Image (cartoon, rainbow, N blue to C red):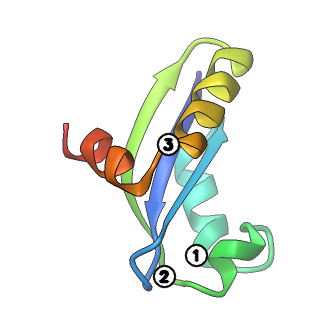
Amino acid sequence: MWYVYILECTDKTLYTGITNDIKRRLVEHNEGNKGARYTRARRPVKLVYYKKFKSRSRALQEECRIKKISRHEKLKIIAK
């Protein structure tokens, strides 16, 4: 399984990514140097949304779609 996820950073910004191990990736974002550069400066981050996909390519497509939409639209996705 692959996951598209959205994190909320301490400064209330949103970060979108993909992974095949959501628990490990959340730990990486909150600890050490393996998290994204963007989230390292905005720790701790909180998982606010995720969705499962059977293929990496489909997860990448959804990640790209989410990254292109406005913050307002992302908040609507999170609220569902």
Q: Position of residue 52 (x, y in %)?
A: 47, 24
Residue 71: assigned label: none
79 left or right of 33 in image? left
Q: Is residue 28 above or below residue 42?
A: above
Residue 69: assigned label: 3
Q: What type is the residue that disc 3 sits on?
A: Ile
Counting residues from the start of the chain, the first of labels 3 and 2 encountered is: 2
How far is the residue under mark 3 from the one under mark 1?
A: 25 Å
Q: Is residue 9 above or below residue 70?
A: below
Looking at the figure, which quarter contains the C terminus? top left
Counting residues from the start of the chain, the first of labels 1 and 2 encountered is: 1
**Residue under circle 1?**
30
Counting residues from the start of the chain, the first of labels 3 and 1 encountered is: 1
Residue drawn at x 79%, y 68% is 34
Mark 3 secondary-structure assignment: loop
**Residue under circle 2?**
44
Q: What type is the residue that disc 1 sits on?
A: Asn
Q: Between residues 68 and 15, which one lies in front from this camera angle?
A: 68
